[in-house]
Image: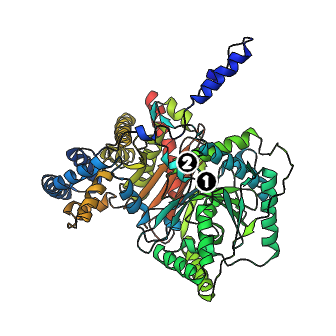
Amino acid sequence: MDSSASQCPKQNHGTICIMEKQVLESSEERTFQYQDSLPSLPVPPLDESLSKYLDAVKPFLNQEEYQRTEDIVKRFENGIGKELHQKLLERAKTRRNWLEDWWLNAAYLDLRIATQIHCNMGGPGPYIEHYWPPKDGTQIERACVNIWHTLNYWTLLRAEKVAIERSGTTVLDMNQFRMLFCTCKIPGVTRDSIGSYFKTETEGECPSHLIVLCRGRVFAFDAIHEGNMVTPSEIFRQLTYIQKRCHSEPEGPGVAALTSNERTKWAELRQYLIDLDPKNLTLLEKIQRSLFVVCLDDSSPHATPEDYTEITRLGLTGDPTARWGDKSYNSIFFSNGTCSAFCDHSPFDAMALITMLSYVEEKIIENEGKWKGSDKMRDIPVPEELVFTVDQKIQDEIGCTKELYYKKVSDLQLVNYAFTSFGKALIRKRKLHPDTFVQLALQLAYYKCHGRPGCCYETAMTRRFYHGRTETIRSCTMEAVEWCKSMLDPSDSTYQQLQLMHQAFAKHNKMRKDCENGKGFDRHLLGLLLIAQEQGLPVPELYVDNAFTASGGGGNFVLSTSLTGYTRLSGSALPMVHHGYGFFYAIRDDRIVATCSSWKSCPETDAEVLCRTVFQCFQDMLQLTVAAQL
């Protein structure tokens, strides 16, 4: 609500003022109030999707291959594709979001790889840039302030007082915000499931306890005592109690490490734990239902505002006994007072998390990083330790899991640097879209490093539709490739390069708009394939054609990318394929913060080199716009 609206004109009618304010407050929007009126996710016309698909595969095929793919697409459009499309339209008639369950299963819950390593997302807390520079001995003190603000956000969400997000004037779906708290993925032998226990105040009681992981041990305490939330001073006492015990007594078994296992294996071990002692199920459920997990991590990652590499790497791939990989939100606090977020990706996309973390950061800044309230403490029960019954088999499995985990993550190369020469302000001044600017720089950098186009996945948001999540913007277009070639051709004039760059920008901007409006083609093609599978039909030729994989289809994108917003919060995730990169970036007024990851065991890729090359391309692109004005 506009704060000026609640300001009363200066007059002596105090009572009118109060009444006006009450009316205004009662008419405030509620977080989830428009959920039922959001439009259903559309199914795009088949011919449009296929035409866009043909356009997208062009950069990766020669003339002959393209001809072959064009024939396959025509056969698909006039044959099986037409039937599948009809069935998809039928499905869409009975569902407000025809994709929702399919996407959740196909993209997340059916995966059998170690999702904690390959799919989870996370990012460093930006607090080192203002009130919380790295400093030993501040872990608990900062953690309790951070946790307190997070708990306040949870109470706002329960009261439906979190502002509804909009794109321009269009209301966006807020459903993902329900998954930030009290949500956990539960491993299954062939498919995982999601347990979500969050409730708004009008819906009823909601779990209110926190889980704390420290040195292989697990503790729980309630965030509400006698109807009121615990204060930072009280949280401080709880965390100090846990830390003292963990530092003066032997380490725990580290059951949390099992969540980093390959999914079927973890499902079997979880069942084994439950069979070993039914009390273990109670403890597992207590973790699943908790608000979120607080991780007290003994590492002290080096960090500066220009180089977040170590916090980001340890946040994503640190001590597996000190994070619960299936939990929707783990808040990690390192021993030098730096911190990081770590999340299971299944229930929500990064933007919901970033909204919450931006709120927390804003409050930390407002209060200068301190707790300015009362230090009075109530008599609160000490945290309860959740002691699992484990036997030799489980202990051995935890050992093996940790060994495998460390082996895998030691192969990760990850850098998180800030490009500080300019940011959004200057890019906008040149009348260019900041996100497209970064995407095209990445295309140029990949071309420079690898001598060929790189198929690229950029996340677009489809939240203007009911339960909408994402669509794929395929950034590697013919327009982008033509421009990259021109930039590397010394005989091309600056004017020519600039013309081609503007064409590439226009193309990308149009694709983004299409995707956000439900007119992308990747999710549509996935839907057609899943209909075929459900009907027990053979996989259509379109999906086994080399062009499909070469252009990134079926999760084969060499560049997996996302803009984490125009905030101080940056994020990261790992590459989609072994010979690929993860590239995530936040665009701020004066800088662009990028996280690039790759696998060391792939001889072709180098995250450090790609990231530095992207930064050089930023300069080249700006130079181009300057030179053109001369």
Q: Residue at x 31, y 60 (%)?
A: 550
Q: Which residue is mark 2?
A: 203
Q: Residue at x 24, y 49 (%)?
A: 89
Q: CA distance from mark 2 to mark 1?
A: 9 Å
Residue 133 appears in the figure:
no
Task: Please state the horizontal and vertical placement of residue 67, each as a whole percent of the image.
Answer: 16, 55
- Residue farthest right in this picture: 376
Considering only vertical position in the picture, is 519 above or below 394? above
Label 2: state its secondary structure: loop
Under mark 2, the amino acid is: Glu
Q: Quadrant of residue 528?
A: bottom left
The label on residue 206 is: 1
Q: Mark 1: give few (<14), some (14-19) or many (20+) Cα within 10 Å.
A: some
Task: Please state the horizontal and vertical placement of residue 623, each as a whole percent of the image.
Answer: 49, 37
Q: Tell me, what colour scheme is on the image?
A: rainbow
The label on residue 539 is: none
Q: Residue at x 21, y 54 (%)?
A: 87
Task: Please state the horizontal and vertical placement of residue 318, each as a whole percent of the image.
Answer: 63, 67
Q: Residue at x 16, y 55 (%)?
A: 83
Under mark 1, the amino acid is: Cys
Considering only vertical position in the picture, is 396 above or below 225? below
Q: Nearer the viewer, residue 534 or 250?
A: 534
Q: Nearer the viewer, residue 591 or 267?
A: 267
Task: Please state the horizontal and vertical placement of residue 149, each as a whole percent of the image.
Answer: 70, 47
Circles 2 and 1: CB distance less than 8 Å? yes
